Image (cartoon, rainbow, N blue to C red):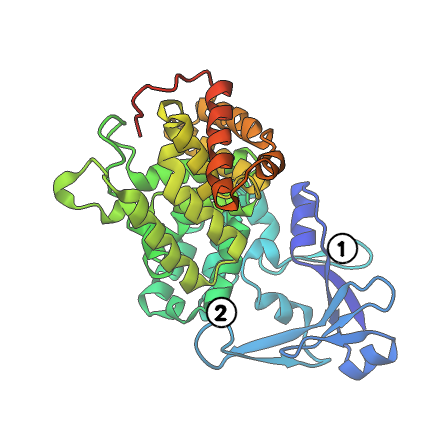
Amino acid sequence: MQIFVVGGAVRDELLGRPSDDRDYVVVGASPQAMLARGFRPVGRDFPVFLHPRTHEEYALARTERKSGHGYHGFSFHADPDVTLEEDLGRRDLTINAIARAADGTLIDPFHGQHDISAKILRHVGPAFAEDPVRILRLARFAARFTDFSIAPETLALMQQMVAVGEVDHLVPERVWQELAKGLMEVRPSRMIEVLRDCGALPRLLPEVDALFGVPQRADYHPEIDTGIHTLMVIDQAAANGLALPGRFAALTHDLGKALTPADILPRHLGHELRSVEQVEILSERLRVPAECRDLALLMARYHGNIHRAADLRSGTIVELFEKTDALRRPERFRMLLESCRCDYNGRLGWTERDYFPQTLLNAALAAVNAVDAGTIARNCKERSDIPARVHAARVAAVRAALNQPGDEPENQ
């Protein structure tokens, strides 16, 4: 029995990057031998075991054979006779097909060290084409390793996989899983760019793909269409360290612009409601978690009003807080403002500017929170009058905090 560290831990060590997880491959062992040493079996698709003390995963060396479409269309063969090179040969990229022995020796049959030095993402072999998830994984790695290029032959193979319909068999949960991971990388725009370059974006995220070529706005640079703007916004979200819900909201906030009638372009009248509909469609199809879906819906619907916060009167601002549930969900509202700030700065390229609506609405929300609704309720003779009285007090508090007059016409 021989044990090797494989995959990401070896790759990241060679890149000088930290790595939290370590994967092990065991060569020359049977499931019975692993059980005899106290390992606990996990997984049903192939033999993986948990170490009795560290609880790290140890997988028996295995080969795999395509037996159907999509991610689950494989049969696996694990046997003591399977070699390390055979196990490494089933992996996706050369940089992930390097193993390290217990004495530190590197086993690199597919020249992954060379591709690390040359900063190239290259598939190990033709078996790459058998698993469509690898397209998503490669796109995600491109978003992480931003100075790596994709080998031309690998991109050509990905394009071929799309052309024969392999990506159409991906299950929604796996698409979301990889998309979510990619959005959390350092430059998520590269994930979208790679998916677009290989032709997978219109199959997997047609709502996002449709944004490319749609004018952003008449007063912006004509070369920055809505698709490019969206890429800039998700990179701003990454640069500002937003959590996944904020990054998903950044990706989807302008989806409705792709449905703007051609005769009114480059204006986008009413695109907020169309964006809400598109976010709902995409979220249902990919089974997006509620936390991500809900924030995306709020940003799609209200980012225009938030951008115009300085022009809104106190009553409209209080209604915004009520409709976004800002009083009960202040952390989510703060993330909404952060996402809108990324939208604002994404429009300007990478020029970071102060986002005044965020300051203004935070001040207004603090004023609303200072209103003692309980006291108002106790002093109200008719219970039916309580909501109106509380609302009026909140409007007055915002008006005072923002120094707004009470009789100016409202610009919404």
Instruction: List x then y, in percent, for residue 401.
Output: 51, 20
Residue 339 appears in view: no
Q: Position of residue 353 (x, y in %)?
A: 46, 21
Q: Residue at x 40, y 30 (%)?
A: 315
Location of residue 379 by image quarter: top right
Q: Nearer the viewer, residue 394 or 366?
A: 394
Say if residue 285 shows up in the picture. Answer: yes
Q: How many angstroms separate mark 1 from mark 2 (CA)?
A: 26 Å
Residue appearing at x 55%, y 38% in the figure: 380
Q: Amino acid at mark 1?
A: Thr
- The N terminus: image quadrant: bottom right
Q: Is residue 95 above or below residue 324?
A: below
- Using the image as rendered, state which of residue 11 and residue 251 is in the foreground: 251
Position of residue 281 relative to residue 41, above or below, is above
User: Left of 291 or right of it: where is 62?
Assistant: right
Q: Which mark is residue 127?
A: 2
Nearest to N terminus: mark 1 or mark 2:
1
Query: Dot 2, how many residues are within 10 Å of its Cα: few (below 14), some (14-19), or many (20+)?
Result: some
- Left or right of 111 in this view: 84: right
Q: Position of residue 239 (x, y in %)?
A: 53, 34
SS class, disc 1: loop
Q: Kindly report which numbered mark, 1 or 2, lies closer to the viewer in this rendering.
A: 2
Do callouts 1 and 2 mark residues in contact (Cβ within 8 Å)?
no
Task: Provide the residue designation for mark 1.
Answer: 105
> Which label belongs to residue 378?
none
- SS at badge 2: helix
- Number of disc labels: 2
* Residue at point 54%, 52% (across, down): 291
Residue kind at label 2, given as amino acid type? Ala
Query: Residue 276: x, y in percent?
Result: 35, 50
Q: Residues within 10 Å of mark 1 (few under 14, many from 20)?
A: few
Question: Residue shown at 32%/51% (left/top)?
Answer: 209
